[in-house]
Structures are given as C-alpha cells and as structure tokens.
Image (tube, rainbow, N blue to C red):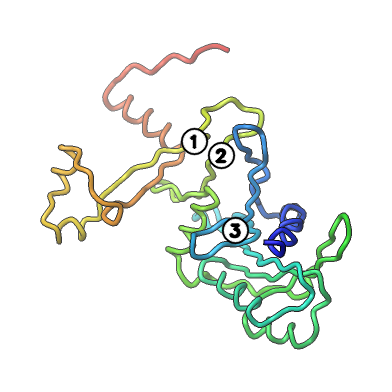
Amino acid sequence: MARARGERRFYKPLCRWLVRRGYYCGQQTSTYWGKIKWFTDRGTKAQRVDVAGVRSIGTNCADEMEIVAVEVRSKGLIRTRDLSDAQDFRQFAHLAYLAAPVKFPDRVVRAAEERKVGLIQISRGKRPRFEEALRAPKMEPESRTRMLEFLKSLEVFQCTLCQCFFPIWTRLNVEIPRSGKSFSELKRTKLSSILNKRLDPFEIVDKGLIVGSDLRISRYICPLCAADLTRILQKQLRLPVPHKVKA
C-alpha cells in the first residue's frame, strides 16, 4: 500500500503533462461535488491503468480514438515485470509507457524497445517534471473489444448511430442531474445466445422478460443523435414540437 501511495503522487501531474501533449485526461469533467475526475486508476477488475489519455485521430469520414496508457513506478529499480505490465496495455491501447523517477539504464531501454514500450523519466521534487526518454511506437490495439471496454471505464462511448466517440460527464459549472449521464443506453439481447436457449427475442421485449447479463449487450446513442431522431420522428408523425422555455 505504501508503494501505491508513492506512485499516486505522480498521477495528476502526469495527467496534466499528457494534456499539454494534446490528450484528454478527464480535465473537463467533475463529480457532482466539483472534483475533477482524472483518468487515473481506470480499467477492468483484472487490469488497471495508472494514468490514461485519449485524443481523436479520425478524419472527416471516420472518428477514431488514440489511447495512451501509462504504468507508473515510484521506485528507482526497474524490473522486467514492470515492463511486462506496461506491455500488457497493448491489448487495448495504441501507446504504452512506463514512467519512473529514474534515469533508465541501457539494458532497460533495450528491453523496452523489444516490448514496444515507451519510457517516461520523472524528476523528483515538489513539482515533478516528465521527459520522454523513449518514444513508444504507435500500434493498433490487439483487441478492439478490449479497447471499447477500456474506453467505457473512462466513460467514453461510441455512438451506435453516428459511430462517433463521446464522453459522458457531469459538466463543470452546469446544473444537470446527479448521475451526470448525457446519453441514451439501450439494452439488447444477444440473438445467438437466446436462440440456443429457445427464447423468442420479441417475446422478451413484449413481456419485459429479464435475461441474464451474459445474454445482454449495451448500445449507446449520443445526445446529438438522440435529438436528431426526436426531430425526425416528430416530423414524420407530425407531432407538435415542444416549445422552448425561455430562461
């Protein structure tokens, strides 16, 4: 636990360093009580990332995200296990780094190059400074499914309709519900799974039957698409458009 607390003192400064390099690390989000929700200690139960950042690298034809994941160490001695932990981030991240307050020896640099892992040197002090000692090569994640799962842990979803990535948040200085959710979540059943169990998908919807989590899948719609769908339905069904309430 002491080692973990030692590492945590680098988390927020490292997030700010990534922000200056063009990454989004949760700096525009906050909890209901106004505390910034940095992208630190995120991921699944089986695999956690100390510090993460995302940025859009798509074109005007397709939206794509770039994920950087950083494993932070507070000790000066770097072991092979530390590099292997950072290397595991390649399953869902485009860039994987190991950050530590040490000048990396040549053997560590060579081992990092072999594992396709970048190195970030941390200078000690009240205000730690960060320097990229070895640039991480950009590579596609090994699993897109794992990538989407990790983005979900960052509260970044991909819209099913427009395929754009969007964050959900409690925005700073804006009064919205405590949940802070600015999206629509749709629950669907996995067709192949329910057919194997001789369940009728339409009967599940009509009767509101509850199926296990292993048979369900979530889909998300961004607020812009939700608003556009509402306008389209109102126009096609000739429904009255709600009047805007004057502030």
Which residue position is annotated with label 2?
Answer: 169
Q: Which mark is residue 244?
A: none
Which residue position is annotated with label 3?
Answer: 57
| x and y, in percent, of residue 32 in the image | 60, 32
The N terminus lies in quadrant: bottom right
The answer to whether residue 21 shows anywhere in this view is no
The crowd level at tag 3 (other Cα within 10 Å; few <14, some 14-19, many 20+) is: few
Label 3 vs label 2: CA separation?
A: 21 Å
Residue at 53% across, 34% down = 180
Q: Are marks 1 and 2 in contact (CB under 8 Å)?
A: yes
Label 1 vs label 2: CA separation?
A: 7 Å
Helix or strand or loop: what does disc 2 sit on? loop
In the displayed structure image, the side of residue 36 where residue 107 appears, left or right: right
| x and y, in percent, of residue 98 in the image | 69, 71
95 or 60: which is nearer to us?
A: 95
Which residue position is annotated with label 1?
Answer: 182
Q: Quadrant of residue 194?
A: bottom left
Total labels drawn: 3
Identify the amino acid type marked 3.
Answer: Ile
Label 3 vs label 1: CA separation?
A: 23 Å
Q: Quadrant of residue 133?
A: bottom right
The crowd level at tag 2 (other Cα within 10 Å; few <14, some 14-19, many 20+) is: many
In terms of sequence position, does the residue under pointer 1 or pointer 2 come before the other?
2
40 or 202: which is nearer to us?
A: 40
Considering only vertical position in the picture, is 166 above or below 17?
above
